[in-house]
Amino acid sequence: MRKTGEEFRSIWQNPADPTVVQIIDQRRLPHEYVVHDLKTWQDGADAISDMLVRGAPLIGATAAWSLYLAANQRSGKSDCRECVLRAAEALGLTRPTAINLKWALDRCRRVIDAASGDSDLVSLLEVEARSICDEDVEISRRIGEHGLKLIEAISASKPGEPVNILTHCNAGALATINYGTATAPVYFAHAKGIDVHVWVDETRPRNQGSQLTAWELAENGVPHTLIVDNAGGHIMQHGLVDICITGTDRTTRTGDVANKIGTYLKALAAHDNSVPFYVALPSTTIDWTISDGIRGIPIEERDPDEVSRIYGRIGDRLETVNTVATNTKIRNFAFDVTPAKFVTGLITEQGICAASEKGLTELFPNMAAQKS
Ligand code: MRU
């Protein structure tokens, strides 16, 4: 069940007990594949904060399922609706950068408003969480189809050679519900028999590249090579990258993109070496209220321990070790913003567009009209 495709989901209801939602504890990959139960909305909030789940679309989906859990917890008590609304407030504070979190909670709040009683609230939130997941799968599939055309064109231009794709962080099936955003075109190309090879950035400090993307690509049989975060510029200078594709946690209406720390430096290197730099995103990641990403997008700062410590396998044991002097001052910026001028194009479920207000508005005229 690890391979992406029809059977894969990063979050699901326990078939034996639908009041329990299950996730993969992503902190433990690639060493262990552990399914973790979410029984309360607080379990969901902790899973988001502690990064058992991560990736903008999956964070949103986990928040939606958490509200279903909250409704189940309080169903039949006089304060059920108020508790669910308080849970929504708390969930909204778990991680600040990915806009999908707010998007999913707002969508659930509309359902909460429409519910006529506790059992209605539970079943409506269950349907909504499931719809958010099903829609995300379809969105990722369509991103894959559109992005595939870019890879096909590069492949046609260098017959007999692999298409080298560089990606940063994990914008894969583990970050969404299935397929991923940045990885979806890669999976589709690989399935079509196109010779693809992925350069996987390690992605310090949490190593989403080495621990998640590399694992995911290996499970799907996609050729890949792990590199340290600072290697991207070097390999671009030597013609070893045909295209960069990353994900995003929040995209302004003008096409600026916030993504995992280090993405901006890859975009600069790509620009200097004329390597196309594409960002793959579901429309749920667009924040139509912001035009200046650098000033407008909140950048999460996380625990310094993530920088000073490394988790891994020593013989048979899994351990976390400290790698820096205890009195070293650390700041742990989790995301950065790549200005639209360095983004060659945005790969969305509606097609590929310029990273600009015009480009996004043409693809999503209704959303642009409603929200800006
Ligand atoms: O801190 P994370 O692991 O949640 O950050 C994830 C990313 O930066 C992803 O690239 C982004 O969410 C896009 S996921 C399709």
Image (cartoon, rainbow, N blue to C red):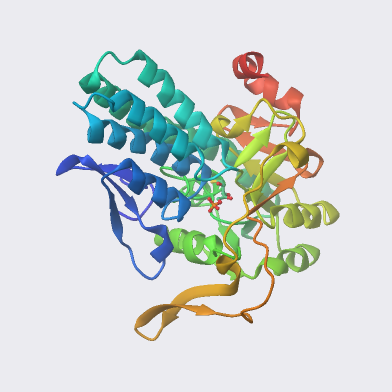
Residue at coordinates 67% horizontally, 44% vertically from top-left? Answer: 258
Give the position of the C terminus as an image quadrant: top right
| Residue in the foreground of this view, choosing between 257 and 224 | 257
In the image, is 322 to the left or to the right of 2? right
Instruction: Tell how many labels.
Output: 0
Give the answer, above or below, for where 197 lies relative to 54.
Answer: below
Q: Quadrant of residue 257?
A: top right
Residue at coordinates 58% horizontally, 27% vertically from top-left? Answer: 350
| Residue in the foreground of this view, choosing between 220 and 290 | 290
Residue closest to the far bottom: 315
Give the answer, above or below, for where 112 lies relative to 323.
Answer: above
In the image, is 246 to the left or to the right of 267? left
Mark yes or no: residue 9 visible. no
Residue at coordinates 68% horizontally, 76% vertically from top-left? Answer: 328
Residue closest to the far front: 78
Residue closest to the far right: 272
| Residue in the foreground of this view, choosing between 122 and 257 | 122
Q: Position of residue 186 (x, y in %)?
A: 54, 50
| Residue in the foreground of this view, choosing between 239 and 122 | 122
Mark yes or no: residue 90 visible. yes
Q: Position of residue 252 (x, y in %)?
A: 69, 33
Q: Position of residue 271 (x, y in %)?
A: 82, 51
Q: Position of residue 116 (x, y in %)?
A: 27, 13
Q: Quadrant of residue 289?
A: top right
Give the answer, above or below, for where 162 lies relative to 103.
Answer: below
Residue at coordinates 40% horizontally, 51% vertically from top-left? Answer: 47
In the image, is 48 to the left or to the right of 279? left
